[in-house]
Amino acid sequence: MLGDIVVRLYDETPIHRDNFLKLAKEGYYDGTLFHRVIKDFMIQGGDPDSKGAPAGKMLGVGGPDYTLEAEIKDGLFHKRGALAAARQGDEVNPKRRSSGSQFYIVWGQVYNEGQMRQFAKQMRMQKVQAEFNALAGKHHAEIMQMRRDRNRAGLQELQDKLVAEAEGKVGKTGMTDEQMAIYSTVGGTPHLDGQYTVFGEVEEGLEVVEMIQSSATGRGDRPVDDIEMKMFIIE
């Protein structure tokens, strides 16, 4: 036994909070493994197929017969110790719905000022694109009509208007001062922000997370020596 990890679940993400508590109370996670571990990145668990899995078995696709609606919030980000939901990629999961059970705990890295500026730029671009897509969706009928009419000037004018509106909503930076400070001192994985639901954080036992993320791994990033978990609810 490597030790205890105590996590606090966020009330701002009630769907994920309630689902995690429900599965933990049912003993769903007991005996499962941290089946995917990447040094200086994260540790992942929650695959029911990992219970008693023989050495060499590929893991990571198991779960209950449902996924969860994304609860991606600007103020909840991938700092070191963040608890987040795993999911399938955008190409098959454009709404970024979360796995019904699989989760990961962030370790990540500490980034310098130049790296943080680049991350902030990328995040701003992502946010502007998301805002633009949402605004364009509200003008879908108008856009389709202009396309049918081959009204290129009208389409360009509307696009320019929506881009300006999206940029105005996002502002000049894609990161808050808090994010910039934490990623450059404590560490984390900023490139995952806005992509996955963060629904909790480690309050005690970060040193255990550090030990796990340093584990020797084999095929599929599975630890060579199995690392089982057992969950308890602290009221």
Image: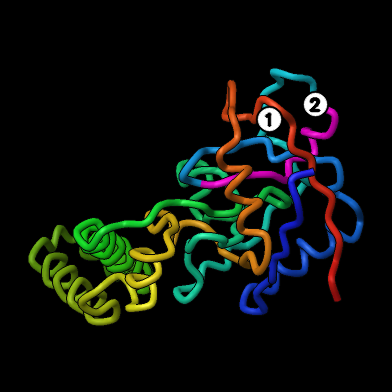
Queried whether the magenta region covers residue 79, the answer comes back as no
Q: Amino acid at mark 1?
A: Leu
How far across and how far down the image is residue 27, in percent?
90, 52
Q: How many marks?
A: 2
Q: Quick check: 180 above or below 228?
A: below
Quarter location, residue 190: bottom left
Q: Nearer the viewer, residue 54 or 11?
A: 54
The stretch in magenta equals: 42-53
Q: Separation of disc 1 and disc 2 at Cα?
A: 8 Å
Q: Which residue is mark 1?
A: 59
Residue at 81% across, 65% down: 21
How far across and how far down the image is residue 43, in percent?
60, 45
Q: Is residue 188 left or right of residue 220?
A: left
How far across and how far down the image is residue 152, in percent?
11, 61
Q: Quick check: 73 above or below 195?
A: below
Q: Is residue 32 left or right of residue 68?
A: right
Question: Is residue 144 visible to us here?
Answer: no
Q: For label 1, count other residues whose C-alpha is less than 10 Å away and answer few (under 14), some (14-19) or many (20+).
A: some
Badge number at residue 53: 2
> Could you tell me which secondary element the residue under label 2 belongs to?
loop
Queried whether the magenta region covers residue 47, the answer comes back as yes
Badge number at residue 135: none
Circles 1 and 2: CB distance less than 8 Å?
A: yes
Q: Nearer the viewer, residue 110 or 142?
A: 110
How is the protein colored in the picture?
Answer: rainbow
Q: Nearer the viewer, residue 31 or 153?
A: 31
Question: Is residue 222 visible to us here?
Answer: yes
Q: Tag 2 or tag 1, which sits nearer the N-term?
A: 2
Q: Quick check: 157 above or below 64?
A: below
In the rendered image, the quadrant that contains the C terminus is: bottom right
Residue at 52% across, 38% down: 38
